[in-house]
Image (cartoon, rainbow, N blue to C red):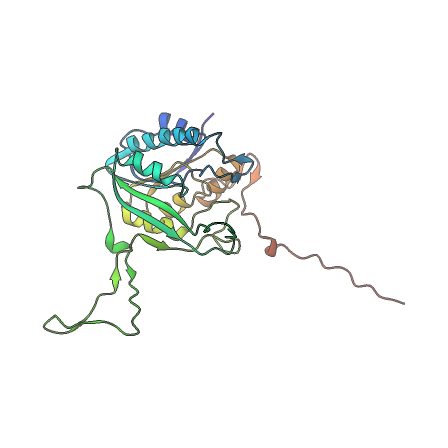
Amino acid sequence: MVQLFENQGHQIFLGDAIEVLSQQIPDHSVDLIFADPPYNIGKNFHGRKDKWDSENEYLHWCYQWLDLCVTKLTDTGSLYVMAATQNMPFFDLYLREKLSILSRIIWFYDSSGVQAKKYYGSLYEPILFCVKNNQHYTFNANDILVTAKTGAQRKLIDYRKSIPTVYNDQKVPGNVWQIPRVRYRMAEYENHPTQKPVALLERIILASSNPGELVLDPFSGTFTTALVAKQLGRCSIGIEIEEEYVKIGLRRLEILTHYQGEELKREPRVYEKPVAVQPALFND
């Protein structure tokens, strides 16, 4: 049974993504979709195992929700979709028949946890940036400028101009994004195995949507997409099948303070918990 929670332009659906997309979201209504589905690599999402019986079953499921996402986009809408490195080629081939793929982005991060011994460990996750109409879509370049790194120790001068001028070092990011993963001691951390960083979603939402427009995340997890959308003045729809993660979203978006009698509070980190002080022992 699907449950809906909403407040001031933000909706959270507790339910299956395909069911909600099919029955609850109007076609041609969403300006930006960010989809970060389970990767079929065995992650444990609060007891729900991220593993299908076969690759074909997993891809069949993915193609169902991808088709629905395409139908939900407005005529000028954009889709960003993530996948495991081994599955992204299938996503790419499938989506290029339905949308225009403008960029193939690499989200690169360092990882002290990579311990591969017999192959090269993965330090990135791929993202496809797709649009419904490659002649008419939103891309707010000036909102996502970064400082270009040239390797020079001083400002470069353009001597071709009548008056030599310092080169503009503010550039649109390339397709390799070095953004740290969310770590346990970071303020934004929530109890979820594949949480995506605020900085990643800020770049995507700023670039590919405008204030007041609608952003959808069909696999919301910790609801970072919805949180950033709210902070940036967009509306949002978040879909999540796991109740424990929906409670995170209800708290982060300030939709509810209590859920079924439970106060919604951020789970304290181990290092934040008070240390019990043992009473001193005195000898007579």
Q: Residue 256, position in %: x, y?
A: 48, 40
On screen, 160 above or below 20?
below
Q: Residue 15, position in %: x, y?
A: 45, 30
Residue 99 seen in render: yes
On screen, 189 above or below 20?
below
Q: Residue at x 60, y 56 (%)?
A: 271
Q: Residue at x 40, y 26 (%)?
A: 19
Report whether 257 appears left or right of 18: right
Q: Quadrant of the C terminus?
A: bottom right
Nearest the viewer among 163 and 283 is 163
Q: Residue 199, position in %: x, y?
A: 38, 53
Nearest the viewer among 196 and 52 is 52
Report whether 272 appears left or right of 100: right
On screen, 220 above or below 155?
above
Residue 179 occupies which quadrant of the picture?
bottom left
Q: Residue at x 24, y 48 (%)?
A: 139
